[in-house]
Every structure is written in structure tokens, then in C-alpha cells.
């Protein structure tokens, strides 16, 4: 089935492009940056989701200030390499990631990419609702109210029926991720130790490379680089209408997002480091438990901000991941898939977006549902599905017919292959750790 006539979608996008052209002609670079930023910041802060922030919390509480601070910075650098490719792919092809896979590799792989993404996204969204419920419990809010409120926010974000408005609202929510910075400052970190950690990548974790260390390492990788990010940012770049002239600003947007996300992630580690210093056993803590345990060291204000940060992280991720699912569905089925369309013009797009969010939230409310098992499966799938996703990404960005002069050069290809190799090794180690829990390295 062919995509419907553009109409309102192209009119809205054309208006945005006129504003961009005027800013460029007037050499108003700050305004131009303001108009073009969005997808990169959203994807990076969106990946600082509930489970990711809990992973960083576990890192700080179990290992303190040391090796993991620069390691997390490295993982965001790797994420930037992968996401920069999606900027070029979206700007040059004017198509989403699933659509390009469908075009280049055929119906089978296009459908496979979409179904795989929808399945893993639903599982991931379940963990986001789990984080929201856990964060809300700190304030005594029931899980029914928390899930309903989260779904309502997702719905309200769509009410503007305009990509620009949706993006700005979601950006405002995403910047709430920086709430972990004041929590870190309230914990009064040892700045000398922080500087030493970044300069020397030490102290190394006690016990060296053991099973627990490997799980934390791989959990932090999975907290930074996941397949849905590729589909979301390329779809958003296409929906926003970025052109080849905007690639540089798209890179800056992605770099700003990576920087902000890195600051929030490392702040979360610093905020929870006092639990390590005071020998607290936080290995089984959830979101509310972390917030409560931190109160003696960061005060009630800090504990409240921490819980709010977990809530915000899960909420932004729900919005972004649901949208990536809807983009993939519309791209592969060749149905209208734009936030510039009305519900009537793009029913399938909006229904998929709301369906995956609603289904995932409903699962969390099922009494006795094995949520911890789902969290484990999601972590495994996120790491194991990333290598083939990187493979598709590299093949597409080096396709002369698609990319022309914007194909990756030797340096970008080397970096991209390096990211693929790094994530592949992580996947192998993670799989071995999960399948053989008694295996020692």
C-alpha cells in the first residue's frame, strides 16, 4: 500500500524549512542551531532511561569513584559514532532506518527488522514502566496511578499533531535527566578522586575481571548503545526534514546530546558513590530503595530529586521508544508515518505508538508477572541484537547508490567497525555470563 498524499505533513515541514533557510541566510547560527537540534539530544537522553540510570546507580554504589567513570564516557563516545551515521542516512535518503533496510535488502529483512524492533521495544518499555512504578513508590503513589499518568503524558505529547511541537515538549522532559547533577553535588564527591579516575582509569574494581564486574561492564554498555536508537534518530531526522546542508548541525546536535547524557550518567555514579564509601550493600536495590538509602548522604531533597530523575528517565524513554516502533511500522508497511500528520491521516502510525506503550504498561500491572526475568531478557537482547544492527548500519552508509558523496570515509568506517567489534565482544561475554553463571574469567 502506498503512502498517502503528503498534504499537511509536507506543509508543516516546509514551514520549518523556511525558518531554517531564513536563519541560514541571516547567518544567525544560534537560531539555526536551535531550529535544528532535537533528534540527537532526544536519542541520547532517551537512552538514559530508567534501567540505565539504575545500572549507573549500581555502578556507583558497588565500585565508587574509579575506572567506571571514564568507561561510561567511552561508551557514549561509541554511541556518538553510531548515531552520527543515522544523521547522514536520514538527511541524504529522506527515509527511516527500517525503510532503507526494506529497500536495500528486501522484504524479508525489512519485515525482520520491524518485527524484531517491535518485540524488543515492548520488552524494553516494560522495564521503563517498572522504573516509573519504582520511582513513584518513593512518593507513595500506586502503580496504577503511575502507569496511567505515564500513558497520559505520551498521549498528550501527540496532541499537537506537529513534529516540532512534539519535539520541543519531549526535549523539555528529557532535560530533566540533568536532575542527577544536583544530587551528585549534594553528595559532596571527592573531586581529587574524580580527576584521578579520569586521568588514570583507576582504581580498578576489586577482584579484577570477575563475573560481577563483567555484568556491570556490559550493563553499562547496554545502557548507552541499543538498536532502537538507530531507528528513532534516523526516523526523527527524516520527519524533521533535515537536508544534506544540515548534516553538520545534526552532528553537533548529537554531540550535545552525548555530552549531556554523559554528564547525567556520571553524575548518577557520583551520587550513589557514598553507598560504596559507607559499605552499604546495594546490589539488589531498586529505584525507590536507592533514593531512600541516599537520604542520609544527600538529604531528603537529594533523595526526592533522585526518585524524580528515575521517573523522568523512564517517561522520556517511553515516548522515544514508542515513537521508534511507530516509525519502523510505517516505513516497512509503507503507510503514513509522521508526527506532522493528523490521527486520521496516519492511524496506523499513532495506533502502533499508543499500542506498544499501552500494552507494556498493562503488563506491569499484572499481579505476579515475572518482571525481573523480563529485565534480564531485555538486557541480553539489547546487547545481542546490536551487532547485526551495526552491520546493517555500516552496509547502508557505504552504499554508493544511497549515500553518494556522503558515504563514510576510511576513518569513519574504522570507527564504525570498532564500535561493532566492541559491542560484539560485549555480547559474547554477556551471553556467556548469563548462560554459564558459574563461569569465571
Image (cartoon, helix red, strand yellow):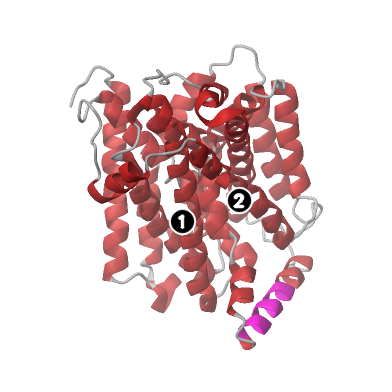
Which residue lies most toward the top here? 368
Q: Is residue 338 visible?
A: no
Seen at 74% across and 41% down, the residue is 153
Q: Where residue 285 appears, x then y in whole percent?
A: 48, 21
For mark 2, what is the residue? Answer: 175
Seen at 74% across and 48% down, the residue is 157
Which residue lies most toward the left here? 441
Between residues 267 and 152, which one lies in front from this camera angle? 267
Q: Where residue 305 appears, x then y in whole percent?
A: 61, 35
Instruction: Tell whether 111 sits left or right of 426.
Output: right
Q: What element carries label 2?
A: helix
Q: Where residue 118 appears, x then y in whole percent?
A: 56, 40
Q: Does the magenta stretch include residue 128?
A: no
Whether pointer 2 and pointer 1 mark residues with C-beta atoms closer than 8 Å, the reply is no
Seen at 69% across and 58% down, the residue is 168
Residue 326, above or below 123: below
Residue 46, above or below 8: above
Seen at 41% across and 39% down, the residue is 189
- The stretch in magenta equals 14-24
Instruction: Tell whether 243 sits left or right of 88.
Output: right
Q: Which of marks 2 and 1 is nearer the N terminus?
A: 2
Instruction: Tell whether 202 sits left or right of 237.
Output: left
The mark found on residue 259 in the picture is: 1
**Quarter residue 217 falls in:** top left
Q: Where residue 410 appears, x then y in whole percent?
A: 26, 70
Q: Is residue 60 visible?
A: yes
Residue 415, above or below 210: below
**Quarter residue 306 falls in:** top right
Crowd tier of the residue under label 1, counting other residues whose Cα lies within 10 Å: few below 14, some 14–19, many 20 or above: some
Q: In the rendered view of the protein, which quadrant contains the N terminus?
A: bottom right
Amino acid at each position: 500500500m502506498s503512502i498517502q498524499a503528503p498534504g499537511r505533513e509536507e506543509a508543516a515541514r516546509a514551514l520549518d524549512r523556511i525558518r531554517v533557510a531564513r536563519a541560514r541566510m541571516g547567518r544567525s547560527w544560534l537560531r539555526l542551531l536551535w531550529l535544528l537540534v532535537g533528534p540527537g539530544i532526544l536519542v541520547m537522553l532517551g537512552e538514559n532511561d530508567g534501567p540505565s540510570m539504575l545500572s549507573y546507580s549500581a555502578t556507583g554504589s558497588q565500585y565508587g569513584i574509579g575506572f567506571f567513570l571514564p568507561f561510561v564516557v567511552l561508551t557514549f563516545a561509541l554511541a556518538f559514532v553510531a548515531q552520527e551515521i543515522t544523521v547522514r542516512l536520514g538527511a541524504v535518503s529522506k527515509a527511516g532506518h527500517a525503510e532503507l533496510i526494506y529497500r536495500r535488502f528486501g522484504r524479508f529483512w525489512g519485515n525482520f527488522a520491524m518485527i524484531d524492533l517491535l518485540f524488543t521495544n515492548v520488552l524494553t518499555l516494560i522495564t521503563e514502566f517498572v522504573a516509573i512504578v519504582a520511582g513513584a513508590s518513593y512518593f507513595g503513589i500506586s502503580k496504577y496511578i503511575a502507569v496511567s499518568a505515564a500513558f497520559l503524558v505520551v498521549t498528550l505529547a501527540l496532541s499537537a499533531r506537529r513534529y516540532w511541537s512534539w519535539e520541543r515538549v519531549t526535549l523539555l522532559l528529557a532535560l530533566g535527566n540533568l536532575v542527577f547533577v544536583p544530587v551528585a553535588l549534594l553528595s559532596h564527591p571527592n573531586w581529587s578522586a574524580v580527576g584521578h579516575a579520569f586521568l588514570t582509569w583507576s582504581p580498578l574494581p576489586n577482584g579484577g575481571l570477575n563475573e560481577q564486574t563483567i555484568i556491570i561492564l556490559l550493563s553499562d554498555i547496554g545502557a548507552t548503545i541499543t538498536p532502537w536508537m538507530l531507528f528513532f534518530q534516523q526516523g526523527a531526522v527524516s520527519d524533521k526534514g533535515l537536508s544534506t546542508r544540515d548534516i553538520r548541525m545534526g552532528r553537533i546536535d548529537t554531540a550535545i546530546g552525548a555530552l549531556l547524557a554523559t554528564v547525567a550518567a556520571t553524575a548518577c555514579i557520583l551520587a550513589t558513590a557514598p553507598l560504596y564509601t559507607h559499605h552499604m550493600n546495594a546490589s539488589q536495590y531498586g529505584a525507590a530503595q536507592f533514593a531512600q538509602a541516599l537520604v542520609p548522604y544527600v538529604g531528603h531533597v537529594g533523595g526526592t530529586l533522585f526518585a524524580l530523575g528515575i521517573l523522568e528517565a523512564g517517561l522520556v524513554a517511553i515516548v522515544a521508544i514508542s515513537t521508534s516502533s511507530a516509525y519502523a511500522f510505517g516505513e516497512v508497511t509503507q503507510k503514513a508515518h509522521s508526527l506532522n500528520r493528523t490521527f486520521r491521516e496516519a492511524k496506523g502510525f499513532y495506533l502502533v505508538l499508543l499500542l506498544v506503550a499501552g500494552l507494556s504498561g498493562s503488563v506491569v500491572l499484572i499481579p505476579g508477572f515475572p518482571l525481573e526475568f523480563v529485565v534480564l531478557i531485555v538486557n541480553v537482547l539489547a546487547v545481542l541484537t546490536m551487532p547485526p544492527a551495526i552491520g546493517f548500519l555500516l552496509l547502508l552508509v557505504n552504499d554508493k547508490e544511497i549515500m553518494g558523496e556522503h558515504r563514510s570515509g576510511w576513518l569513519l568506517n574504522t570507527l564504525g567497525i570498532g564500535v561493532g567489534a566492541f559491542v560484539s565482544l560485549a555480547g559474547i561475554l554477556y551471553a556467556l555470563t548469563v548462560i554459564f553463571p558459574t563461569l569465571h574469567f
